[in-house]
Amino acid sequence: MLVDKYFKHHKVPSPLILEGEDHARHFEELVLWNLCETQAACGACPGCKKVKKNFHPDWIHMDGSVKMEEFREKLSALRQKPFEAKVRVFTMAHFEDASTFVQNALLKTLEEPLAHWIILMGVRSRFRLLETIRSRCLILKLPPVSQEAEAEEWSDKERKFYTAIQTQNHLDAYQFVESEWKERDHFYRLLLKFLKRASEEGYPGHWLQLAPLLERGLAELERNINPKIVWDRAWATSLDDKYELEYRL
């Protein structure tokens, strides 16, 4: 259980970021600990039963693709006093998909917290959140679900590229990109695959410098920017001695 493993006295901190592909499945557990009437995630009290049925009045939940108007409504609901429990819990799955405007709208709430609310965010990668949000949150990196099984699906070519980034081997990285970038969707999926592995392994070697830049590039790929341009800019910037790593924790 996540709470037993990471949180002393079963106290869930707020605001909290869960980083990992499967973050959403952990929300119910954390919500149960906060909204259980026995404060023990018993699973049997009326509060727990409502959480499991997904309609507890003090659990406000949303997905990162939420529109600004709806997001403001949810923030307004968060500020209300709890209806049944001692706190209100606000969970946001895949919050890296939220627009910059939505993320900025959250900042004031984070800067002026109230005692009766718990804010939980889930992301695939912390680097797609604004630094101003990350700096105000505790970040819990979730263990990979099936890292060993996934590793078997990698080709020798992909493993070579991943290592090339880690060791700053420009030639091997260049050769891989040249062979893969022309199909935009394919290249996009590859970058997601590599970034996921780098996140799971704690951004080894040069991935620490390159990952946040590629995360930014993914958004540009979604706007039909040339994949080669996205890659070249991220790679060159990551190798620049004058580059200050904005996303270092």
Image (tube, rainbow, N blue to C red):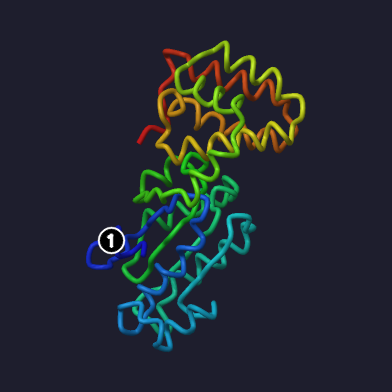
**Mark 1, other Cα within 10 Å: few <14 / some 14–19 / many ≥20:** few
Please name whichever residue, 72 or 120, is drawn nearer the observer in this view of the structure: 120
Tell me the quarter of the picture where residue 120 sits. Answer: bottom left
Question: In which quadrant will I find the C terminus?
Answer: top left
User: In the rendered view, does 64 fall on the left or right side of 78?
Assistant: right
Residue 126 coordinates in the image, percent (x, y): 46, 43
| Number of on-image labels | 1
User: In the rendered view, does 219 fall on the left or right side of 194?
Assistant: right
Residue at coordinates 37% horizontally, 80% vertically from top-left?
Answer: 36
Q: Which residue is mark 1?
A: 7
Residue 48 coordinates in the image, percent (x, y): 43, 82
> What amino acid is found at the position of numbered circle 1 in the picture?
Phe
Q: Residue furthest top?
A: 171
Residue 88 position (above or below residue 95): below
Q: Secondary structure at mark 1?
A: loop
Q: Residue furthest left?
A: 9
User: In the rendered view, does 232 fall on the left or right side of 164?
Assistant: right
Residue at coordinates 50% horizontally, 31% vertically from top-left?
Answer: 211
Residue 93 position (above or below residue 169): below
Question: In which quadrant will I find the N terminus?
Answer: bottom left
Residue 12 coordinates in the image, percent (x, y): 32, 64
Residue 220 coordinates in the image, percent (x, y): 66, 33
Residue 49 position (above or below residue 19): below
Residue at coordinates 46% horizontally, 39% vertically from top-left?
Answer: 199
Residue 125 position (above or below residue 46): above
Residue at coordinates 40% horizontally, 82% vertically from top-left?
Answer: 43
